[in-house]
């Protein structure tokens, strides 16, 4: 049986990220994301619905999030769903669905609900660009490299 576990979310942080390090030295942060949905109901009125999602970021992604994001920042997160299960103090089984973020793109600019502590467009960070260790980080080039001008010969 085939399976596919991918999640892409765009929303705003519900709190400031707090960076921690596990004993191995790997950075980790947990962020809350509010994702808004607006649709028309059966009676024609608009219905606004907010979904709150807990997201765990690891390695350099966690460090960058803590450095550049703050409550209200707009961000795109791509990752996978993970089910956490545990027993509470009364022995009751509990579980919670969360997202393990593997790619993060900061949206907006300072003062516009995005970029938080940074000016201008926030950096893009993709863990896969740097291998598993995530030792390096670079902001995207603003030279427009890789962007092509529209072709006038396109028939539409």
Image (cartoon, grey):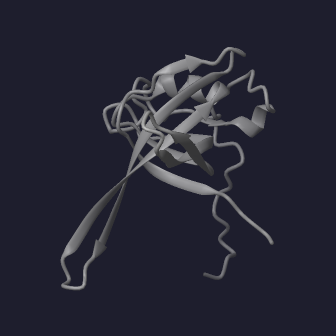
Which image quadrant for residue 150? bottom right
User: Which x, y percent locates residue 83?
Assistant: 59, 49
Q: Quick one: 124 or 41, which is closer to the camera?
A: 41
Q: Quick one: 147 or 123, which is closer to the camera?
A: 123
Q: Quick one: 107 or 133, which is closer to the camera?
A: 133
Residue that appears at 60% across and 81% down: 156
- Counting every numbered tag in the picture gives 0
Residue that appears at 24% across and 85% down: 42
Residue that appears at 52% across and 39% down: 87
User: Which x, y percent locates residue 115?
Assistant: 43, 32
Q: In what quadrant of the picture does the N terminus appear?
A: bottom right
Please state if 122 lies on the left or on the right of 34 as rendered: right
* 134 relative to 38, above or below: above
Please state if 41 lies on the left or on the right of 141 as rendered: left
User: Which x, y percent locates residue 55?
Assistant: 51, 41
Which image quadrant for residue 100? top right
Which image quadrant for residue 101? top right
User: Which x, y percent locates residue 43?
Assistant: 18, 85
The single residue placed furthest to the front in the displayed view is 90
Please state if 1 lies on the left or on the right of 126 as rendered: right
């Amino acid at each position: 049986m085939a399976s596919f576990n991918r999640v892409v979310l765009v929303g705003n942080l519900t709190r400031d990220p707090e960076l921690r390090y596990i004993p191995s030295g790997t950075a980790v942060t947990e962020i809350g994301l509010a994702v808004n949905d607006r649709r028309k109901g059966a009676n024609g009125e608009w219905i606004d619905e907010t979904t709150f999602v807990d997201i765990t970021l690891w390695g350099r992604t966690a460090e960058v999030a803590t450095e550049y994001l703050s409550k209200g920042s707009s961000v795109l997160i791509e990752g996978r769903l993970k089910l956490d299960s545990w027993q509470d103090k009364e022995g009751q089984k509990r579980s919670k669905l969360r997202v393990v973020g593997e790619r993060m793109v900061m949206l907006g600019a300072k003062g516009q609900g995005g970029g938080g502590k940074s000016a201008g467009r926030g950096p893009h960070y993709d863990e896969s660009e740097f291998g598993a260790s995530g030792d390096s980080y670079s902001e995207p080039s603003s030279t427009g490299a890789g962007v092509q001008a529209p072709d006038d010969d396109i028939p539409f």
